[in-house]
Image (spheres, rainbow, N blue to C red):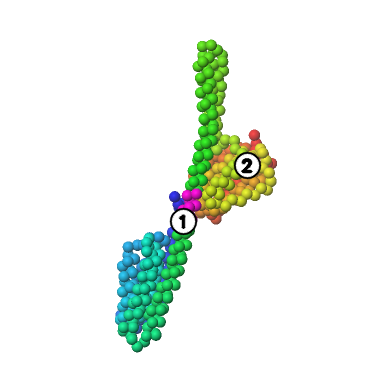
Amino acid sequence: MRSPDRGGARERLRRLNVTTMVTVNASVGTLLVAVDARTWWDAVILSLGVAAALVASARWTASGIPRFVLPCLVITALVWIAGVLFVGGHTAFYGISVLGPLYAPKLQRHRVVAAVGLIAFVAAVGTARLLVAPADVPEALLLYVLTPAGVMVVVTGGMFAGQVFYDLVEELEQSREREAELAVVRERVRFASDLHDIQGHTLHVVKLKIALAEKLVRSDIGRVEEELREVRALVGDTITQTKELAYAQRRLNLSVELENAKNLFEAAGIRVRVDREADVDERVNELLGQVLRETTTNILRHAQATQVRITLAESGITIVNDGAGTAPLSGLSGLSTLRERVGDNGGELTVEQTDGRFLTAAAFSNGRADR
């Protein structure tokens, strides 16, 4: 699932590309019509080819071919034929030289065949100029065959290269998104494993103690009462541990969480840099581990990060990632809970989003958490 910010960036980039294409095509097309048309009728015919190219350019999208492209292609082809046989306008191929290379690379199949066919069509139509102007063979070959075909080859090659680059970027992006989703799934599996460790062991012990109590219920009532008290205490402790796990308050080890975060980020294709300015005070180890775990989950779920920098100090931790976008991020309630917990222990949790970068920092005064 793509983030809204990324989708907006794509749309803005598409609009910029379209605006640039339309502006350039309109300017060049108008200039060629003005230079090549000798009568108003010539101008009308040549303008039709330019207009068709502009329509196709204005409705260009990064993927897919709109239905109106084929009629526009037919118009530009007819304009080129009319330009060669009737108008005598060697720039009449301009429309097809814009439209053909723009959409041929987008075909699902036979795109190379289509591109070669367009180039051959332009050259073949240009050759027909020899039928109406047999005396000017060198000029006709240069202006109506070599130049149009050469332009078509260069432009088509450039558009194919651009499409290949776009397809590669799209494939890499999809692969990265799949890796990030897989990393989140792994984190969920780890959470399930922690939950199993807490409750599975407890339930097994409870089962044994209840079985023992059943055997002693008629012979040693005092021992039965003791076993039941232990069961109640064990269940109560399990409930507390389960709540702590659900709210990311279970005792954690910062070193273990750091290694886990690095593995998750690397699996998602995110570069990780860890700077150790000093050894972390053991009294803040657990809380900093919670901050790192929650931040890691948030980066994988809500950001489109390419790099993460983790800085460890004696009294705190700082995590900075890119790919945060510009829109305010939602779904970060876990950080709000941690802010209260860090504050209750004499520390401060800072969360900032600036210029597409997201910073999460936890610091404790005097290098310790209040107990």
User: Is residue 82 visible from the viewing direction of this image?
Assistant: yes
Q: Is residue 145 left or right of residue 189?
A: left
Residue 269 drawn at (x, y percent): 53, 51
Q: Is residue 180 left or right of residue 89?
A: right
The local secondary structure at tag 1 comes to helix
Q: Type of residue at label 1? A: Glu
Q: How many marks?
A: 2
Q: Residue at x 56, y 40 (%)?
A: 338
Q: Is residue 222 left or right of residue 159?
A: right
Residue 324 drawn at (x, y percent): 52, 52
Tell me where the magenta segment starts and ends, as one range. 172-179
In the displayed structure, 136 sits above or below 315; it is below
Q: Residue at x 33, y 69 (%)?
A: 73
Query: Toward which corner of the image does residue 349 lie, by quadrant?
Result: top right
In the displayed structure, 80 sits above or below 168; it is below
The local secondary structure at tag 2 comes to helix
User: Is residue 352 visible from the viewing direction of this image?
Assistant: no
Q: Which residue was labeled with disc 1?
A: 171
Q: Residue at x 54, y 35 (%)?
A: 194
Residue 111 drawn at (x, y percent): 38, 65
Q: Residue at x 35, y 78 (%)?
A: 126
Q: Nearer the viewer, residue 132 or 17?
A: 132
Q: Which residue was labeled with disc 2?
A: 255
Which secondary structure type mostly characterizes the magenta part of the structure?
helix
